[in-house]
Image (cartoon, coloured by chain):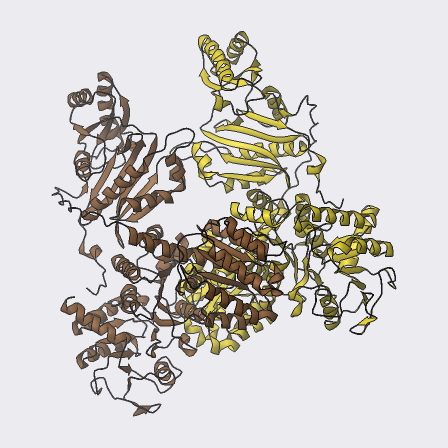
Chain colours: A yellow, B brown
Amino acid sequence: MSTDATTRAAAIHGLIHPQSIAIIGASADLSKINGRPLKHLLDKGYTGRILPVNPKYAEIAGVPCHASIASLPEAADLAIVAVPAAEVLASIDALGRRGVRAAVIFSSGFGETGAAGLAMERELADCARRHGMVLCGPNCLGFVNAFDRVYATFSQYADGDTGPGPVAFVTQSGAFGTAIAALARQRGLGLGYFINTGNQADLDFSELMDSVIDDPRIRVAAGYLEGLEDGDALIRLAQRCHQLGKPLVLTKVGRMVSGQRAAASHTGALAVADTVFDAVLRQYGVLRARNEEQMLDMLQALSQDRRPAGFGLGIATQSGGAGVMMADRAEEVGLTMPELTPATQARLAAVMPAFGAAGNPVDVTGQFVARPELLRESVVALLDDPGIDVAIVWLQLMTAHVDVLVRIFCEIRDRTNVGNRKPFFVCWVAAPAAALTRLRAEGIVVFSAGERAVEAAAALARHAAFSRAQQSRQPSAPRAAPVLPVIDAEGVQPSVQAAQWLRAAGVPIAPVALAADEEQAVALWRAAGGAVALKIESRDITHKTEVGGVILKLDDEAAVRAAFSTLLQRARSAMPQARLDGVLVQPMAQGHLELVLGVQRDPIFGMVVMVGLGGVLVEVLKDVAFRRAPFDADEAQGMLRELRLGALLDGVRGQPGVDRGALSQMLSDLSHWAAAMRPLLAELDLNPVLVGSTGPMAVDCVMVLRRQGPDVAQNPSSHA
Amino acid sequence: MSTDATTRAAAIHGLIHPQSIAIIGASADLSKINGRPLKHLLDKGYTGRILPVNPKYAEIAGVPCHASIASLPEAADLAIVAVPAAEVLASIDALGRRGVRAAVIFSSGFGETGAAGLAMERELADCARRHGMVLCGPNCLGFVNAFDRVYATFSQYADGDTGPGPVAFVTQSGAFGTAIAALARQRGLGLGYFINTGNQADLDFSELMDSVIDDPRIRVAAGYLEGLEDGDALIRLAQRCHQLGKPLVLTKVGRMVSGQRAAASHTGALAVADTVFDAVLRQYGVLRARNEEQMLDMLQALSQDRRPAGFGLGIATQSGGAGVMMADRAEEVGLTMPELTPATQARLAAVMPAFGAAGNPVDVTGQFVARPELLRESVVALLDDPGIDVAIVWLQLMTAHVDVLVRIFCEIRDRTNVGNRKPFFVCWVAAPAAALTRLRAEGIVVFSAGERAVEAAAALARHAAFSRAQQSRQPSAPRAAPVLPVIDAEGVQPSVQAAQWLRAAGVPIAPVALAADEEQAVALWRAAGGAVALKIESRDITHKTEVGGVILKLDDEAAVRAAFSTLLQRARSAMPQARLDGVLVQPMAQGHLELVLGVQRDPIFGMVVMVGLGGVLVEVLKDVAFRRAPFDADEAQGMLRELRLGALLDGVRGQPGVDRGALSQMLSDLSHWAAAMRPLLAELDLNPVLVGSTGPMAVDCVMVLRRQGPDVAQNPSSHA
């Protein structure tokens, strides 16, 4: 760690775990935004030193008040800044001069108001940087460190019980984040940290989460995002979470076109293409929750310490219908419902009444009220089945039977607390409040609806599977980074040149040569020894077929000559201004399936590789998969599995299946090359890539180079 | 109404609205299954006569007890039967002899236990029918008529407050149904009727719902289904609900393969193909809720009396992020987020703080706490916008501001209680309990999560749109029912014959003729005056292409002769046993798009018409739409809109669009013919149907006739 990084880390540590807190602009009215932090710090027993600053008061609520920042008796670890926007910059400067190294800024009136505000916000960040200070905000609700009783916030969330607990929650939204925190509290899910990032003038989502995730009391990280600027930082965070064995759950709004429009008008943050965002999260093992309820469901499942070894779900239910509904949902979200072994069925038959079904779902009926051991033995038998990795027990109401049911669930927990300790969840619909409280106190996870329990179990299984795959994955052999080509000009590259670069990187691409005149074209056809395609070549024509610029299957001299002049004529007629470099001659390639491969430089995540099925139907379906480059062939196999039309790869109606391995290797090779080309490559399209018995082969290529500007290479409000 | 139907209707009325209730097997232990009805009837103030029957007691809880059914002082309107399974038949017979015309049977041990139980159940139904009695159950929790305080149930639901309210809820599941009823109560959603159908030996879901839906105090019907036998009855119910202007919401489990397997093992009911079920619900304007939470969300939206005139959603929110999330969901569920008119924007700008966005979603920020009129005026302006049909207001917590917020929402309600009275919903996340109670008391619908509110608004908009479409739809001109053909044999019909029947029904199908020998084939080719296709014809070969039985584009005599003998050889070699009738000769048809049309006789819903895109990709995607026959061309247009690849119909990559009108007319004509053919037609495949500039044309046809057996024509446990 460099000295700068060390200093910054120390400042961040001071921010989150301050021994002393200055409150700039502290109010004597403890119900006001600038009064609430002091109230919470006092009420909830913060043990460090509190230093209100306001020239109007000698003391507030018994705490001595200081006239100015300069007259502070010590350089506080943290300053809470709650002054009007116009005074914030002066306060930060004064704090920096006083030696304070961390501030949380409540004040609004910055980037969220437009260009002038954004300029003020950048000044603020610059000032902080000069002083070696870190900032949370501005325009934020602040944060809570529940372990150390640090209440640097005016969020309504702090009005109630605030944990602590195993969840670190970082939110870009104040209002929605407060709502999520309050819902977590309703579920008995404690937050160890609650942090609202605000405008992220300095510290952003990823760095703030990174600053709390290694706290051993934290088991799971949860984030709410509206926009993202630094994709690399998010990926480093995801990797760190996995190293620590702590799941990261994210909700990001702006999934659809109208939502993204709304997001763009709401925040200044760049709108990430959601399909890419979604793919990158999957690639790095981040769990995405579609809304706040699903996030909390996942957090409940993930905050207990048992992990399933596979995707087999066992269900025990008091209602056959609820079992059917959960089985439906399990299939949709990637869980399996294994049939039980004969041994398990025999165990169930020994305890079940005649009319309960002994399959999976196991219908325990309502008889367990009379015979509690029926429920206990059924669920233990289910969890003992080798095919079952996680179980859900569904029941409803039972207001009169809370005592016995809580006891049974505890017995199930204890009986299964050995060996591989498979997780089980209770889904108790319309549960008495006492049942929820008591089960949660026993560390038993309880949901209120069947489909939600299944979705949470699936998230837990996906997380565990990702962790296993990471552990078992062979590290890729290190690759020599390709030497970046020396280029004459940016923009569309000559096809012959582009094909050479790709071939050198191991990407299979059909040989192609440029004919400047008919004679050369004929010579190239003869040399090919079979049918060729002729294609117009011009840096100004990226979509050759749109100008009629491709003629296929030419296999005699006259046809080659005619095609040559036809192509030139068509191009001149369609695009008179285009500079024509000649005509490409290429042997006809084999393959019964058309794919499209592409690379784009995403402003957030850098080089992103795409694969899709080609052809007209796919244009309608937009059936494509993305991954951030680079990635290995295993990851590429995952891309192919995501294609809705992926079954075509295995051959339908008598067509042979294609070599998924060779295709995956091609994708991986392309991704490594693309990653190395990040400073130069803007865009690459391989369309079509023909796939047949001889493996995949790109037959056309459009490569656009453009040097990456410094404004794209890094976060504009970067802390680097 | 026939006398039988009148008698039955009277019996059902007595069941649901009894003036006197006998309790057969009444227990003195009021906590037992056979004691609980008496307890509830007494506690909750049933005003009719209660007649316990049990020879062991002279009275129970102060109510005189009768020694036997025969000695009952009157023929009660309703008997509750809670005796062991073996004694139920005798009880029903005795009740019938005593003149009782309705019974609810709690007892289990019937169809749900297997074949022997099912036989007992059928005996029970026969016995009741002989006596002109109606039965609810067996194996049910009974029912509640909350208006008349009839508690013919032992459901846990009756332990708490039981309404009444505007919802009629009928459930096939006892346990899940009780849970749903309890959840409805938690939301302040009152049930006027709660009915558990049990095994449906006599009264089924549809008839029970039908018996309560015209109660003017009921505004909305909700059902939970696990299986369905009588599809026609469900459709009649759906139509009745629409005539009454009362939405019908259904949740049916068994959507997926594993769920259907679980459903099949759980109930004896026929598993309806879920895609067909789903399509039929849409066709008849039934709202399907995927689970209990979505059902209750929809019921909340539907139980208020305002209806949106379109799909435009306006959102006012305290959190930009929540607005984005709701906008996303709106797009997914078919709502639009209209831009506001300049007039509305000016109104908003006049009341909004500088940093709130005035678009849609409207971000009212947290400032409305200080200036309540900001929220009121914003929402009223939003609802006044001509593009907005329904609005959602999102907020969170605000524990300290319940009074002012409830007042504001009431003012918004009153201000918008004129003109077209657009509905608005409050979405209050982590709301204080008092806020929920007070808003509900004011008739204001409140949700707890943004996406749910949007889904409920979409359901309301769909319901209103269906009602409008029903009112504006021109009644189809009555069609003469086609004369059912006289057929020689069931099974696959000769192609020439099948094509004639379809052509007569108005379905465009390419001319086709049968050649018994080469000479005839040549003559037919000459007569065609252009290229022809030759196809093998055999009642034993339904998939011609699988035996190489189709040769296309033949346009000279030698080719026709060669093809004729090739087809015979191929057929003999592939299927030596097949009876070969000759070779079909058909002019080549035109069209650039392949569709598949089909008809199947569904065991539940009768004749069902399918349309899908043809070809290999579609085989992978299974992109098809269904409707119950008959239907008009408008409905067929809806089928085409459901196809995921429907954009292909409008032409991609320069292809011309197809005539959706002609295709819809073809589907409608096919559906009318299919409906009339219900007694005969088992299956029809038109594959491919070529569509081009000259309209659609079926070029191949497989028609299978099979007389409908009486066991399929009607419900096996029918009450008819």
- Residue A289 appearing in the image: no
B524 on left or right of A461 = left
Comparing A473 with B387, the one in front is: B387
Whether residue A193 is situated above or below residue B513 in the rendered picture: below
Residue B623 placement: quadrant: top left
- Residue B504 appearing in the image: yes
B188 on left or right of A144 = left
Residue B419 placement: quadrant: bottom left
A458 on left or right of B255 = right
Comparing A691 with A205, the one in front is: A205
A140 on left or right of A621 = right
Work out which quarter of the rendered image holds the C terminus of chain A and state it: top right
Count the marks: 0
Q: Position of residue A339 (x, y in %)?
A: 44, 56
Comparing B186 with A585, the one in front is: B186
Comparing B127 with B453, the one in front is: B453
Q: Position of residue A248 (x, y in %)?
A: 63, 53
Whether residue A297 is situated above or below residue B57 in the rendered picture: above
Q: Position of residue B599 (x, y in %)?
A: 26, 44
Q: Position of residue A7 (x, y in %)?
A: 82, 51
